[in-house]
């Protein structure tokens, strides 16, 4: 008859697995706390606005000013000096990691939570 039950190795693996799950949950909870923000990257710098306050902002770009609207937790381009207006035709963004870009005007907007910002280097923009 064979004995069944937890052996020492099984017990250690179970404890390590439980610890990994607890660590992962804590890490996820600590990352990105706070309300989502609209981050706007331009040739002149970066602007950050909370999505909780409705507003319309005019942002200078390479070929002129773009108008961006923040309303009801979403953001979109209202107007831009680009010829094809693809950025204006894009759907509003509202979730983490959503983005819209106006390439001719070199304006890139995205949704982030505070503390999750990654540095953008010259090669990736």
Image (cartoon, rainbow, N blue to C red):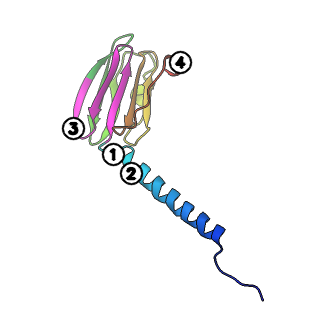
Image marks 4 and 1: residues in contact by CB distance under 8 Å? no
- Near-viewer residue (26 or 123): 26
* Residue 86: x %, y % from top left: 45, 25
Q: Which residue is mark 1?
A: 33
Question: Depth-wise, is mark 2 or mark 4 nearer the camera?
Answer: 2
Q: CA distance from mark 4 to mark 1?
A: 28 Å
Question: Depth-wise, is mark 4 or mark 1 nearer the camera?
Answer: 1
10 Å crowding of disc 1: few (<14), some (14-19), many (20+): few
Q: Which residue is mark 3?
A: 53
Please give the range of residues in magenta.
36-57
* Residue 79: x %, y % from top left: 33, 23
Mainly helix, strand or loop, the magenta region?
A: strand
Q: CA distance from mark 1 to mark 3?
A: 18 Å
Q: Considering only vertical position in the picture, is 26 above or below 77?
A: below
Going from N to C along the chain, the mark reached first, 1 or 3, is: 1
Q: Is residue 81 left or right of residue 51?
A: right
- Near-viewer residue (67 or 125): 125
Residue at 38% across, 36% down: 111
* Residue 8: x %, y % from top left: 64, 70
Residue at 37% across, 15% down: 81
Q: Considering only vertical position in the picture, is 92 above or below 78?
A: below
Secondary structure beneath label 1: loop
Going from N to C along the chain, the mark reached first, 2 or 4, is: 2
* Residue 37 belongs to magenta span: yes
């Amino acid at each position: 008859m064979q004995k069944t039950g937890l052996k020492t190795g099984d017990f250690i693996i179970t404890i390590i697995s439980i610890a990994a799950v607890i660590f992962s949950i804590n890490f996820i909870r600590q990352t990105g706390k706070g309300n989502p923000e609209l981050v706007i990257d331009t040739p002149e710098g970066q602007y950050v606005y909370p999505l909780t306050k409705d507003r319309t902002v005019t942002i200078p770009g390479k070929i002129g000013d773009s108008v961006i609207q923040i309303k009801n937790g979403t953001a979109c381009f209202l107007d831009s000096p680009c010829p094809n207006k693809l950025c204006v035709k894009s759907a509003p963004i509202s979730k983490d990691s959503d983005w819209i870009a106006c390439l001719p005007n070199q304006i890139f907007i995205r949704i982030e939570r505070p503390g999750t910002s990654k540095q953008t280097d010259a090669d990736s923009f």
